[in-house]
Amino acid sequence: MNKSRVTPYMVVAAVILIALAIFFIFPLYWIVTGAVKTQSDIIIKAGETVKWFPTVISWDNFARLFKSQTSLFGAQMPMAIRWLINSVFISVASMILTCISASLAGYALAKKRFWGRALIFSLFVAAMALPKQVILIPLLSEMSALNLVSSPWSVVFPVVGWPFGVFLMKQFSENIPTSLLEAARIDGAGELRTFFSVAFPIIKPGFGALAIFTFINAWNEYPLQLVMLQSNESKTIALGIAGLQAEMSTDYGLIMAGAALAAVPIIIVFLCFQKYFTQGITMGAVKG
Amino acid sequence: MATTKAPKRSLVLQRRETVVSYLFLLPALFFFVGFVIYPMVMGVITSFTDASLANGGQGTFIGLSNYIRLFQDKIFWKSALNTIIIVVVSVPCVTAFSLWVGSAIYKMRSGARSFFRCVFYLPVVTGSVAVVVVWKWMYAKYDGLFNYLITAAGGDALPWTESATMAIWCVLIILFTTSIGQPIVLYVAALGNVDSSLVEAAQVDGATNLQVFWKIKWPSVMPTTLYVAIITTINSFQCFALIQLLTRGGPNYSTSTVMYLLYQIAFETEKNFGYADAMGVVLAIVIAIFSAVQFKVMNGGTTE
């Protein structure tokens, strides 16, 4: 298709793109290599070239990262692993709850005609345009009243409440042919059965997009985690690393080991489900 | 029993559908009302009180005092100015740049296209904490890569985040790398939907690539541009994690933003919830105005 002749512009564009790609990948490369460098590889000595590659692979940074121990359900484990488990728990719980609540709500908003529909939908959309971080303070008072401070649910519930998922699933639900829903009704299928056997197979791609989107968002929802998760045991991996950096800001090897632990799992998840992710971003923007 | 069109349905069926719909909406409404709407309302109410950590968040009504104090607070104005600088620099840069990358990659083979899309999305996925800690190391005075490269090339080491004039640019560079991923994905999709027969017709008529871009592609992707501008505006206004992790608002408030100041006042310095909430309310109103203006201005230029 694009077998047209190569113009000078195309060459320049390709060079810029590749340079940019390197610029965007490099920080990640620096995290991963920094995590396995020895202290002497990290220090830049006068007159020597910087160590672009680790001279030896050392696990010493990870050993130091895992030194502080804690226990969970009776099992002894490094604090950093506990943080990682907290992150996974928060992301998975947010993902499951969001998928259930948003797909049901999106389906109702797209396919049902009922009193208050327009009002509810515009409330959802208006809330999305508001800065979500301005509700941090009242949210903290609410969570302390509910006795949920330092509980993973204090992060999960607001993430699930964020209306983007409802909006996305409404977009996907518009694709369900009304005739199919009516046919199911005539056949005597109940509302829930209609939803699961007719609507669900059609909105499944949206489900995938929403799941991966919510997982990554919850993982990276730093301000909320910072305010809510106050005890050391309740921290997420991102929050834990932020704390490490505040305490020992020049121990770059240790901090990079932590950053690698925070970044690598989520990047793997992203790469595995990349296809759904792109779809989710694009669908969410239509009629934005 | 079979119903086909809404106007013909009986009242009983309509009522039944309303009840069923609300049952479907119930879980989402529970979380939305409980953890978004309720705190928003509480935030507005608290902004008219003197609630703080000292009185357990149970403040008394003090009218507009927090708002009056806000307009006399020099640090607030300094932070507001920084926030505006961040928005004014990042929105056009992110929009223009992601449109350029989008147009450069959307016609590539799908493998190359996904590769670039992924690369530019990586900093978003990596998360602000991991991204900021590695940039902080690269910016470091000693053992930092940038100063190494500068001195190796014969220049003088720069203070980067430790200088009141440079620090905000250090923030802006990181913000840029974490902001263009999503717009690029959107532009690639939007450009792929541009009517190719229009483009071909123009090329047959001898239009240059630049003319094709401005006359055909630019108007067709206008809705996407509007969306990108609005989300980038909202994100830039809320710039917080980068600042909290990189500079803590310093040196000398040179990188303090409204969002960061709000956090500091609520949780670090005065622990004054009422005053911080007043800032949040003002920030929300300003963001709403900005979004509405962008919508008006840019929607005026669309063909759709």
Image (cartoon, coloured by chain):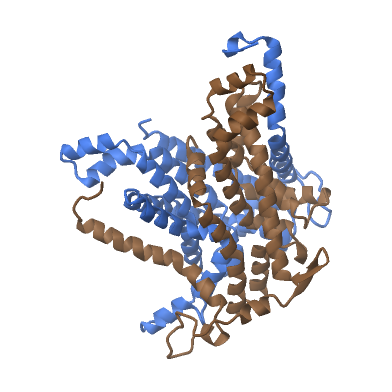
Chain colours: A brown, B blue
Residue visible at 70% across and 68% down? A81
Residue visible at 62% across and 58% down? B260
Left or right, residue A177 beside residue A75: left
Check the image and report above or below for A195 versus A73.
above
Left or right, residue A278 beside residue A258: left
Q: Position of residue A223 (x, y in %)?
A: 65, 56
Q: Nearer the viewer, residue A163 or A179?
A: A179
Work out whether residue B7 can be spotted: yes
Q: Nearer the viewer, residue A161 or A215?
A: A215
Work out whether residue B73 can be spotted: no
Q: Position of residue A198 (x, y in %)?
A: 59, 29
When asked about the image quadrant of residue A120, the answer is top right
Residue visible at 65% across and 68% down? A241
Q: Position of residue A143 (x, y in %)?
A: 78, 50
Q: Position of residue A48 (x, y in %)?
A: 43, 89
Residue extending farthest front: A187
